[in-house]
Each structure stands twice: as C-alpha cells, then as structure tokens.
Image (tube, grey):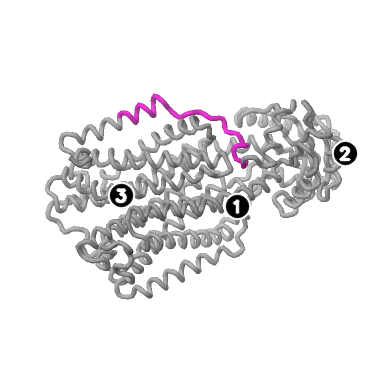
Amino acid sequence: MHATTIIAGRRTAWAFALVPILLALAVIGGVGEAQHDADSRDLLPDHADSTTAAWLTDELPQETTEAAIVLWTADSGQLSDSALAAIKPQAEGPFVPAEDGTAAFTVVPVPAGNADTVGERVEELRDRLRADAPDGVTVQVTGPAGVHADLGKVFDGADLRLLLATMLIVAVLLVVTYRSPVLWLVPLVVVGLADRVAVVAATHTLDAAGLPWDGTTTGVLSVLVFGAGTDYALLLISRYRDELRVTASRHEAMAHALRRTSEAVLGSATTVFLAVLTLLLSLTPATRGLGLACAVGVVVAAAFALVVLPATLVLCGRWVFWPMVPRHGDTSQADRDGVFHRVGRLVARRPGAVVTGTLVLLAVLASGLVGMRFGLDEADQLLDRPEAVTAADRLAESFPAGTVEPTQVLTRADGDQVLAAVEGTEGVESARVSAEGGGLTQIEAVLAADPGSAAARATVGDLRDALDGVPDTYVGGNEAEAVDGRAAAARDLRLIVPLILVMVLLGLAALLRSLLGPVLLVLSVVATYVAALGASWWIFSTVFDFAAVDLKIPLFAFLFLVALGVDYNIFLVTRAREEAAEHGSREGMLRALAVTGGVITSAGILLAAVFAVLGVLPLVALAQLGTIICVGVLLDTLVVRTMLVPAIAVLLGDRFWWPRRV
C-alpha cells in the first residue's frame, strides 16, 4: 500500500492529523526555544584581524564597561561660559569642548551587560543629565553604550510584530485565493504550527552544533517556513480540488493528489535544503547559523505539508471548500477557458516574440545595477534614527568624524612603540592608550575620515601596513570590521553562489531526468535575480534613499530567490512532463500552464508579501532583503514562469527534455 493512501485513508487519516498536532503542541509548550545570548562578534568573519582584536578585549580588565559618549550642544550659537561651568562638573572623565564652541563631550564608562541591562543604565544616565542640563543646552548620549541601548530598544517586540504581520498577510491572501471563509484556516493553522516547531527544533539544533542565532535568525526562519509551507499547501490543495472533480471518494482524491504533488514538493524541499546548507561554508558564524536554521525549517515545513495538511483536509470533507465546493463530474481546471489558457494561446502564437520581450524587460530592469553601492555605515543600519545615531551625527559636526567609534589596536608588543606607529599613520587624528593588563595594550585611534568612507577604509589599510612587522598586533573597531566584512562577503559570494547553482541544477536534473531543461531553468532564475537586484536598487536609491546595500544581502537574496524560484520551476515542469506523456511536449506545457498558472501566481504573490513583511523589523538590511525577494518573486511568477519558460518550451518542443524522451 502506498504511503499516500495510508495518510489519506478512511481509517488512518485521523492519526496523521491528530498525533503530529498533539506532538507539535507538546514540543512548543513543553520543550520551548533554546536560549542564546547574542554577541555582536557572531557577525564577524572567522580569523579576521578585527575579529581577533574583538575577542582579545575580553582579556582587558576594563572590558566590564562600555563607553557612553555624553554630548552637550548649544541650541543656538556657542556654549556660554555659564553653561560650560554648569556642565563641566557633570563630566566623569576628560571634558572636551569643541573648537567651534558649539559643543562639548565626555566619555562615561557604563557597566557592560545585555541590551536590557545597558539600556536601563543609559536611560538612567540620560534622565539624570537632562535634569541637570542648563537652559539652552541639549544633552544626548551616544557611543558604543548608547548604540547598544538604542538597538535593544528598537527590537523590543519586533519578533512578535513580525509573526503577527506574517500571519495576517497569509490569512488575507489565503482568503482571497480560496474565496472561502473556512478553507484558509486549515493551511494557516498547519503552517503556523510548523513555524513554531521549526523555531524550537532549529534553536536546539543550533545550540547542539555550537552555532549562534538571534532574533534576526528566527525572524527570517519564520518568514521562510510560512512562505515555503504555504506554497506547498497551495500546490497540494489545487491538485486536491482538481481530483475531487474526477474522483467520487475524497480519500482516493487526496491520495492521488498527494502522490502527484509529493514528487514536486520533495524535489523542491530537497533542493532548497541543500541550497541553504551551503551557508555553512560562510566565514561568518551568524550566517552559518542562519543556513542551518533554514535547513531545519524547510524540512519541518515539507513534513507538515505532506503529512498533517492532507490528513486534516481529508477529514474535513468537501464542505471545507464552501461556497465553491468541487463536485464529482465538474469540468477539470485543465479544460476550462481561464486566464492562463489565454496566456498559453498568446505564448503558442508568438513564442519568439514572448521570449524576446521578456528578456528585454529583464535586461532593462537589470540596468539598475549601474551605480549600485555596497556597505552600510552603522548609522545607516536602522530604519529609525534613535538618539545614539542623531547624536553621533551631531558629534561629527564639531569633532573628528571617528570620535564616536575609535579604531582599536590590540597588541602584546611594546605599547609605546605601537602607539608611536599609530600616531604617525596618515589619516589618524589622535591616538591614546585606553586600557592595559595581562601583557595586552589597547590603543584607540580617532580617524579623520568620515565613518564608512573610502578614506576611512584606506586609513585602516595604512594602519595595518604600518603595524605589519609588529607581532601579535591587530587592528579592530567598526571601520576595521567593515573592511574585513567586505572581504568576507566577497569571498562567500564567490564560493557559495556557484555551489547553490550546482545544487539547484543537480536537483532539477535528477527530478526531470534531463539536462537542457534544467540548464535553461537555472539561467532563467539567475536572470530574474539580476533583474530584481537592479530594480530594487532603483527603489532603494529613489524611494527609500538608502545610501548602499548591506554587504550580506546579495548572497542572501540570491540564495532565497534561486532556492524559492526553483519551487515554481518544479511546480510547472513536473506537471508539464506529466501532461506531455499524453498530449506531447508543446501541448503538455500549455496545459501545465493552464493548470498551475493560478496556483503559481497565488503562491508567488503570497511569498512576495510574506518576505516584504521583513520591513516590520527595524533593520535596513532586512528591509532590503524583503524588497529584493518581493520584486524577484513577482517577476518570477508573473513574467518568467508564466511567459518566458513556457515560450522557450514551445520553441524547443521535445528538445526541452533532452536527452530524455517524453
């Protein structure tokens, strides 16, 4: 007896619906998520100069504190003598007035801890200083402690907002897709349970593997599970609805639908699983953690879609489709004259023109890549601009640009010798020994160049050149980390992107047992990615005024667009292969388009909307990732999978399946 018959069986379906749901509830409520204290060093590439410097700071006795920079500025004109006399006693460290007379700052050590702890201490400091500020003077707190505190504040409740927004978007689009007040609840509940199980399973897997994670990891994981899980659900339910029209027994209809869709879902899930696992080759621990978490999520989503969902649906009966209940004997979707029949006729009449037109469109969109900039400053990482960011901007107006986040040099060599070398480096405004202990010296260097600028990166390179012959000496801090992050991102892109393409190509070749078709499908996905990246840069630079694209986004966007774009390839071509066996390659592709066009379009719109919800989180990088994937998925489902691929298949005929014979 086939497994699908057991899952959808009259006597066994209840077990495949009820038992997994009860187990899921037990796991969610009884086991819960694993806990991990996020560390900013998880975002740094392995073995980089700046990463070594960051870890060496643990050996310094002063590492129990973070620096809060208190900035006083005159509301107009310069700080008066009376104002300076009033604020100077509040400085717990050196009091530094600006040469232009409009501002002054001091550095206050704040006891280190997690974001909540640091946030409380920074807020106490802000309240106390504002209460004592003289009239006409504004006081703000920035520096590492201020940024740490404000980052924690903007993330408060972000995970819950993301989950609720995702569920709301999925619910609305499912109602629109199914036009039923009941049916949408079944896939939403099943995928929602899958999401919570995936988060629990993924965090415990990461904990066992010794990999880090944070709210961003679980947020992206939830979006992926909801997106992929709902895609699988749409494909299954669409096929089940068709089978109910030709099969009297709903159990037999589901068994047949599950048998037909399981190959596509398993092929898609396996390809996505292998693709996201390539992130384990990244130099960055947080990226490796995201890859493993997403791999776990894809497995859970596919399992719930292929086991729990069909069993639950078949238990509900035909009435769950009310008011558009499919009856035995109704006309099948493939024989109805719908929108995608008309699209198919257009493709069949002018396949060459369709191919040329879609390729020109993709090329025009891809031209947006001209002038694209990469690498966000720390101040540009957040969609909002909290006090620490605005204060840092104001500080840079009256003091050297690198004052807020000095570049750090950690050395076990002679501190005086290293200090002299740092001070003598062009582009260094000032330098001082900030901490010593255990044979280790920390030197803080204020750079003259603006943070994130090419000049700042050049100064970091000059510092490293100047210290190249000094043993056990490492250049760290934000600017150095940005330099090393660029190098690591470029290396990951060069290594992982080809591997993803190979994984996807092998997966398609194994599923279709052909070569030419998979190569063309992979090329179509790559073209979609390039076009989406170009179109998104236009959006970023003109609508949102983003200065650049985060360094990690091209890789993440490629991964998710290619991996998820394979879903729609597989949904279309597996049905085309099935139809081609009876109707021939040309007609088989057109019938497949007529049958799957609606579900692919619905799935694409839903997935695009789900990834767009990443903008709920306050990070610019996630908003950029969501936008690129949203644009790419819409292009893929509305243009490439609907027009370009069917047109290519019509032009090639049986050769599309080469060397396999249909």
The amino acid pointed to by label 1 is Ala
- The reply to whether residue 306 is in sight is yes
* Mark sitting on residue 426: none
* Vertical relation: 265 (above or below) 208: below
* Residue projecting furthest to the top: 30
Residue appearing at x 22%, y 47% in the figure:
321
Cα–Cα span, label 2 and label 3: 71 Å
What's the residue at 60%, 29% (across, down)?
A: 116
What's the amino acid at mark 3?
A: Leu
Task: Identify the secondary structure beneath mark 3.
Answer: helix
Q: Is residue 11 above or below residue 223?
A: above
581 or 373, nearer to the observer:
581
x, y percentage for residue 46?
62, 40
Kindly give the residue lying farthest to the front in the view shown: 659
Q: Which mark is residue 81?
A: 2
Disc 3 designates what residue? 234
Element carrying mark 1:
helix
Q: Which residues are magenta?
A: 22-45
Q: In whole angstroms, how far apart are the C-alphas of marks 1 and 2?
A: 52 Å
User: Which of pointers 1 and 2 lies earlier in the amino acid sequence?
Assistant: 2
Quarter location, residue 540: bottom right
Question: In the image, is 630 to the left or to the right of 313?
Answer: right
- The circle on residue 490 is 1
State yes or no: residue 39 in magenta: yes
Q: CA distance from mark 3 to mark 1?
A: 37 Å
Left/right placement of residue 129 relative to residue 352 reads right
Residue drawn at x 48%, y 42% is: 291
Q: Vertically, is 164 above or below 511?
A: above
Crowd tier of the residue under label 1, counting other residues whose Cα lies within 10 Å: few below 14, some 14–19, many 20 or above: some
